[in-house]
Image (cartoon, rainbow, N blue to C red):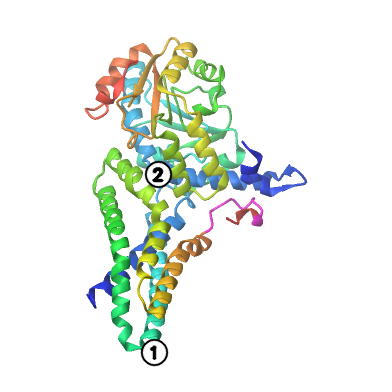
Amino acid sequence: MAHSSCAACRWGRGGILDPDGVDAVLLRCHLELQRLSEEMQQGRRVADVLAPLLAAVRATTGTPRPRVVDVGCGLGHVVRWLAWHRPLGPVELVGCDLDAALVTEATRLAALEDLDCTFLVADALALEEPADVVISTGFVHHLRGDALPAFFSRQRGGAALAHWDIATGPLTTLGARLFHRARMREPLARHDGVVSARRAYDDAALVGAVRVGAPGLVPLLVDAAPGRNPLTTVLRPVLGVQPALVEPFLDSAGPRLRPRVSRP
Amino acid sequence: MRVLVPVLLATLALLDGSFCGFRAAAGRDARIAKRGYASAAARDGAVAGTAVLLALTACSTAALALEPGRYDAFVLAGQRMLLVMLPYAVLVLLALVGYVAAPRTIAQTLMSTLILGPFTLARPLVVVAAVLAGGTVADTAVRAVVVVSGLLVLAVEPLLRRRRPPVVPHTAPPWASAA
């Protein structure tokens, strides 16, 4: 990130960043990010895919209450949305992030609304009790080079993975610039949103990374290019699913979701 | 027209104030259920819009007291402003109705990406264009009121943002919460 664009630098002393100031900037950025996530209905989008996926996990593995872990959950908007609306049936919801300030705030918010979910400052892929399904939103574009297949490789033992990230297309950067300018106030949030859009992986790269990292999983895409509408698909997931789960998942997916799922 | 124009302008000012209130408060509270928070924010915005209306009414009344014959110039300026603002407002309202009425993720996202997001960015330009259009009348006092109206409308959202600072944990230093 360019130094001149780093809003946190305003809260440094003698060239050293003030940790409390940095935390406050990050929290404000994530508050604004959640606003965007709310407007784009990210909670509902995740639920639309996870509900049939978890139904397939329950039916196939016999796990009555599958464990869903959100990697890099930030303020835990998706996890808390799922805990509030309960569209998934019996499920254990866990959010993980390495930033303690974000996790503290996510925990406070969950307690405030009496939500049945947990937030941990932890490596989501190294928990004592591993996840049945690992999810993330706007996370995988941060992983560059070999780190992406390595990330998927660490999830190959689970039932499935589902990672939502910025859908690439001709309008991606323009849309990101426009919406981060219209909806966000923090310079860091505005800057990061556009950089993230530029770094987003296309479908082929994500599917390729799943194949390399987790060859035992079947990669699936929802709203794959080139058929997707850039005005309605801002984020789309890449899935990696145990072979035995593919058909039960597609069977559980309703008539609205099933046509949007493709096997690349 | 002598009644319709001021009524339409006042309605737009109140609606715009409400939306300013909502936008100023958005992205500042991370709870999942916050309908009450959003309603209160829109109400604050409507109050701010009412204050703008009162200020403009006072300005207009003073100008009319000096020269009662300039009411027609006010109406003409208002008509020209509405020519710019009304199509914008109608599209935004239709998009909002679509967003609320269509409980489909895709339809709501379309309303946001196609209209609500871009039109938020365009709002200051629309206000400036409306002021330029309204400012083409010959009467200087009317032109002055038109300019003041634009400035006040543009000032509402930044002022409301100060009223609702982002929620940050108590561990953060006080100076870090300044937007």
How many marks overall? 2
Kindly identify which chain the residue marked by label 2 belongs to.
A
Residue at 36% of width from left, 12% of height from top? Answer: A243
Kindly identify which chain the residue marked by label 1 belongs to.
B
Q: Position of residue A1 (x, y in %)?
A: 61, 36
The secondary element bearing badge 1 is classed as helix
Q: Which residue is mark 1?
A: B66
Snapshot quadrant of residue B3: bottom left
Q: Main secondary structure of the magenta part?
A: loop
Q: Which residue is mark 2?
A: A38
Res B11 seen here: no
The secondary element bearing badge 2 is classed as helix
Question: Which label sits in the foreground, 1 or 2?
Answer: 1
Extent of the magenta region: B165-175
Snapshot quadrant of residue B8: bottom left
Q: Position of residue A164 (x, y in %)?
A: 42, 29
